[in-house]
Amino acid sequence: MEDVDRHSMGVWLNSQYFADHGHCTCPRCKELWEKSGVGWFEWRRREVTNYIAQVRERVKKDLVMCIQPDPITACERYGVNFDDLANYADAFNVVMFSKNYATPWYWEMLARGFKKLLKKPVYISLYVSGPGDSAKDVPSVSDLLTVSVRCARAGIDGILYLANGIGEIRDFQKAAVDKVELRKRLQSYGGQNVQEVLSLVKNWEKIVE
């Protein structure tokens, strides 16, 4: 980890928490919990927080923590306490992967919730394509543009798009550039944050020609 930190702009942690409710019941975790003298949820919270503290000691550059899109029960499900992690993180990345963004209000609601709860900059990740996906398997470009703008007006600090490769991300950028009428309509969705996202999309015109 120290080597990655030295040779990069920082470290982004993914899945640095328990998998979900009921995890982990391996012999090691059961023994440590029973010896701890605290409740199950509290023990999981301490395990995650202590691990992040150890990571922070080793990472001198930016440390970004990816979190699941659950702003309410993250502690019970994953052992993640946002205030604990904010003591160590430089920023958070909310992983909002989905193959359908047809209900953008839902994702905007999550973005607003996380922006209110988290005490560090908040990024989101959106899904463009993955291994083995066909055109019918992935979100439409119109839905991706719309959800990007709606999350932007919630005040998030940046958007990352996940694609299977450089060809797929360029195809997405080209298709987004071609959505001229939609981009015009989306200009009415908000202030500076919305206009910044649309301006970035317009700048893609220079790289997809």
Image (cartoon, rainbow, N blue to C red):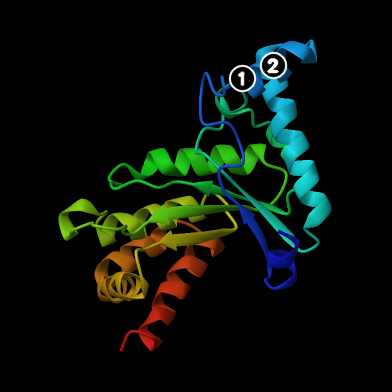
Residue extending furthest front? 27
User: What residue is pinned by disc 1?
Assistant: 27
Residue 29, position as x, y percentages in the image: 65, 22
Which quarter of the rendering shows the C terminus? bottom left
Q: Amino acid at mark 2?
A: Glu
Q: Nearer the viewer, residue 147 or 183?
A: 147
Q: Amino acid at mark 1?
A: Pro
Q: Residue at x 44, y 46 (%)?
A: 96
Q: CB under 8 Å between callouts 1 and 2?
A: yes
Left or right: 83 with respect to 169?
Answer: right
Residue 67, position as x, y percentages in the image: 57, 42
Q: Residue at x 69, y 33 (%)?
A: 48
Residue 71, position as x, y percentages in the image: 56, 32
Which quarter of the rendering shows the N terminus? bottom right
Which picture quadrant has residue 7?
Answer: bottom right
In the depicted structure, whether residue 154 falls above or below residue 30? below
Measured in 3D between alpha carbons, the distance from the residue under mark 1 to the one under mark 2, in whole angstroms, is: 6 Å
Left or right: 198 with respect to 53?
Answer: left
Which picture quadrant has residue 113?
Answer: top right
User: What residue is pinned by disc 2?
Assistant: 31
Left or right: 125 with respect to 86?
Answer: left
Disc 2: CA contacts within 10 A as few (<14), some (14-19) or many (>=20): few
SS type, badge 1: helix
SS type, badge 2: helix
Q: Nearer the viewer, residue 160 or 56?
A: 56
Which picture quadrant has residue 59?
Answer: bottom right
Q: Residue at x 55, y 24 (%)?
A: 77
Circle number at residue 52: none
In the depicted structure, whether residue 155 falls above or below residue 208? above
